C-alpha cells in the first residue's frame, strides 16, 4: 500500500494536474510561501454561483508540496465552496494524524496520509490546501487577492 501511495504522489509531481500560470476570468489569486523551505505557490480560483468552477496552481517547491496541490485541485474542482472548505479541513486533520472522515472525497489526496508521520513535511503537504481555503475565504470576503507567508 505504501508503494502505491508513493507512486500516486510521484505521478502528481511528474505530471501535475491543473497546473497553469493563469486562469481565464479568475475571481481570486492568492500567493502562499514558506521561506524556511522555499515552497511557493500561486493559486487562482474562479467561482460560478457557489461552486469552484476553475482552479489552477503554479509554483516551486518540493515534490510533496507540488504533488499535494495537484491532488487538491482534482478533489476540490466542481465542489460547492462550503464543501471545499470542509474537505480542506478534513485534509488538515489527516495531516495531524486523524483518520480522514471523507477519504473517498479526497481522491488521490488520501495518498498523503503517510506524510503525517514526518512532521517537517506536513507543512509542505498542507500548502495547496491552505491556499485553496484562503482563496475561498478571500472570495467570500469580497477581495480578489491575498498573500500569506507561512513561518514555523
Image: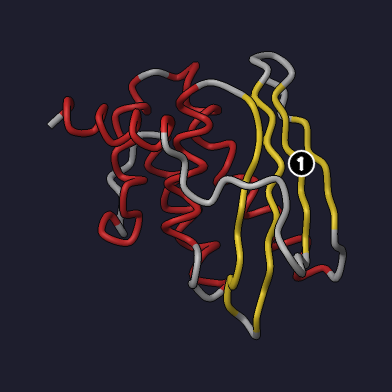
Question: Dot 1: few (<14), some (14–19), or many (≥20) neighbours within 10 Å?
Answer: many
Q: Relative to residue 104, is residue 67 depicted above or below?
A: above
On the picture, is 1 further left or further right than 47?
left
Indicate the position of residue 77 as horizontal and vertical percent values.
Answer: 50, 65
- Quadrant containing the C terminus in the rendered view: top right
22 or 49, which is in the foreground?
A: 22
Q: Which residue is mark 1?
A: 31
The residue lying furthest to the left in this view is: 1
Q: Residue at x 26, y 27 (%)?
A: 6
**Horizontal side, residue 119 vs residue 48: left or right:** left
Picture coordinates of residue 91, whole percent (x, y)? 43, 47
Q: Position of residue 51 (x, y in %)?
A: 58, 77
Q: Looking at the picture, does residue 40 appear above or below residue 142?
A: above
From this viewpoint, which residue is outermost toward the bottom? Answer: 49
Q: Residue at x 57, y 45 (%)?
A: 19
Secondary structure beneath disc 1?
strand
Q: Is residue 119 above or below residue 26?
A: above
Side (left or right) of 27 relative to 67: right
Q: Quadrant of residue 40?
A: top right
Q: How is the image coloured?
A: secondary structure
Q: Nearest the camera: 28 or 124?
A: 28
Q: Residue at image x 34%, y 34%?
A: 11
Q: Percent x, y for residue 2? A: 17, 27
Quarter of the image where one finds residue 101: bottom left
Query: How many numbered discs sit on the rendered protein?
Result: 1
Answer above or below: position of 91 versus 96.
below
Q: Quadrant of residue 12?
A: top left
Q: In the rendered image, which quarter contains the N terminus? A: top left
Residue shown at the point (33%, 41%) measured from the top left: 98
Amino acid at each position: 500500500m505504501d508503494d502505491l501511495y508513493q507512486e500516486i504522489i510521484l505521478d502528481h509531481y511528474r505530471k501535475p494536474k491543473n497546473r497553469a500560470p493563469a486562469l481565464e476570468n479568475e475571481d481570486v489569486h492568492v500567493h502562499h510561501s514558506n521561506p524556511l523551505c522555499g515552497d511557493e505557490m500561486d493559486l487562482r480560483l474562479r467561482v460560478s454561483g457557489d461552486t469552484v468552477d476553475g482552479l489552477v496552481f503554479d509554483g516551486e517547491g518540493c515534490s510533496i508540496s507540488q504533488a499535494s496541490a495537484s491532488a487538491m485541485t482534482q478533489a476540490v474542482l466542481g465542489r460547492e465552496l462550503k464543501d471545499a472548505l470542509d474537505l480542506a479541513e478534513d485534509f488538515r486533520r489527516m495531516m495531524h494524524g486523524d483518520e480522514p472522515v471523507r477519504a473517498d472525497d479526497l481522491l488521490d489526496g488520501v495518498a498523503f496520509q503517510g506524510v503525517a508521520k514526518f512532521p517537517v513535511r506536513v507543512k509542505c503537504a498542507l500548502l495547496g490546501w491552505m491556499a485553496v481555503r484562503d482563496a475561498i475565504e478571500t472570495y467570500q470576503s469580497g477581495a480578489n487577492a491575498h498573500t500569506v507567508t507561512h513561518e514555523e
